[in-house]
Every structure is written in C-alpha cells, then in structure tokens.
Image (cartoon, rainbow, N blue to C red):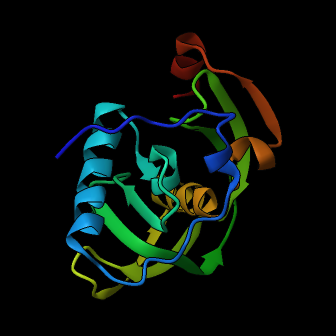
Amino acid sequence: MAIRLIVKEPDEVLHKKAKTVTTVTPNVKKLLDDMADTMYDAEGVGLAAPQVGILKRLIVVDADEEHGLIKLINPEIISMEGEQLGPEGCLSIPGLNGDVRRAETVTVRGLNREGEEVTITGSGLLARAFQHEIDHLNGVLFTDIAEKVYEYTAERSETEE
C-alpha cells in the first residue's frame, strides 16, 4: 500500500464528476487501500478518489468506532433525515473550514471492496462524512455549499470542541 498525493484546490479534477466503476479489479482494491492509507496519514476522516486525482466513484470513510473503516464503490445516498449545521474542513482545501448544513442521518448504498452490495446508515459525523465524500464524486466542494467559510486555526478548533 502507498500514500498518494492529495490534490489541492483549485485543481480541475476536484470540480469534475467521477465515473462509475464497472468492475471491481485488483487495481480498484489497491486504490481503495491506498486511499485509506493516505486518509490516515493526513489525519482525515474521509477521502474520495478525485482527491488523489482519479475520477472514479470510490470513497473511504472512518468517522466512528461503530463502523470503523468503510470502503465504498459507487456509493449513493438513498435516504436522508433530519438536519445538522456544523464545521467542515477538507484535505484538498487546507487552511479553510466552513459551516455546512447536512442531513443528520443518511443511508448509503454501494459496493464493498469485494464487490458485494452493502447498505450503511450513519448519523452525526459519519453522515456528514458520507455526504462530503459523495459530493466530491459529483465535483462539489464544501466551499461551494457552505453558509460561511473561514480560515482554520488550531485555536478556533479547540474552542469548537
């Protein structure tokens, strides 16, 4: 497995729609593994393939202890409930955070690393991470939908916790 370079804004790839994965190949599995390693190395909670420069519908998320690391191929949100407004950041947009309104609970369907269909429901941070990463697959960044964008500082982060 390898750590990949995270693409930064304003790279064009971040604004394009990713393509559906038609076959789960060894290369797709390796990419998912590399994405997980890259996400952990960057201390993120999610990463989408366009963030490593690849326009494929792949995400990895690790946002709660209940589910742990989730690797999804062709994820789609099939239901949304409630609402939450909170801060988001992005590994592709260092130094900025934004207040983004998201669903409180989402159910996502996709394929796991083995190509089997899975459905996962998550709330709070996991729901936010799913929505954020799936937005990446559609060329949408949190800065496109944030109600307010501001510079990220360690002091501000500590006061928000």
Camera-side residue of 31 and 47: 31
Camera-side residue of 160 and 108: 108
What residue is drawn where x is 39% and y is 73%? 73
Residue 69 visible here: no
Q: Position of residue 152 (x, y in %)?
A: 62, 20
> As displayed, is residue 73 above or below residue 5?
below
> As displayed, is residue 127 above or below residue 79?
above
Q: Position of residue 146 (x, y in %)?
A: 78, 44
Residue at the top extreme of this rendering: 155
Q: Position of residue 125 (x, y in %)?
A: 49, 52
> As displayed, is residue 41 above or below residue 35?
above
What residue is drawn where x is 44% and y is 49%? 47
Count of labels shown? 0
Q: Quadrant of residue 96?
A: top right
What residue is drawn where x is 38% and y is 56%? 61
Q: Quadrant of residue 69?
A: bottom left
Residue at the left extreme of this rendering: 1
Camera-side residue of 135 and 99: 135
Residue at the bottom extreme of this rendering: 117
Q: Quadrant of residue 8?
A: top right
Q: Position of residue 18 (x, y in %)?
A: 58, 65
What residue is drawn where x is 65% and y is 34%? 9
Camera-side residue of 92 and 143: 92
Residue 40 visible here: yes
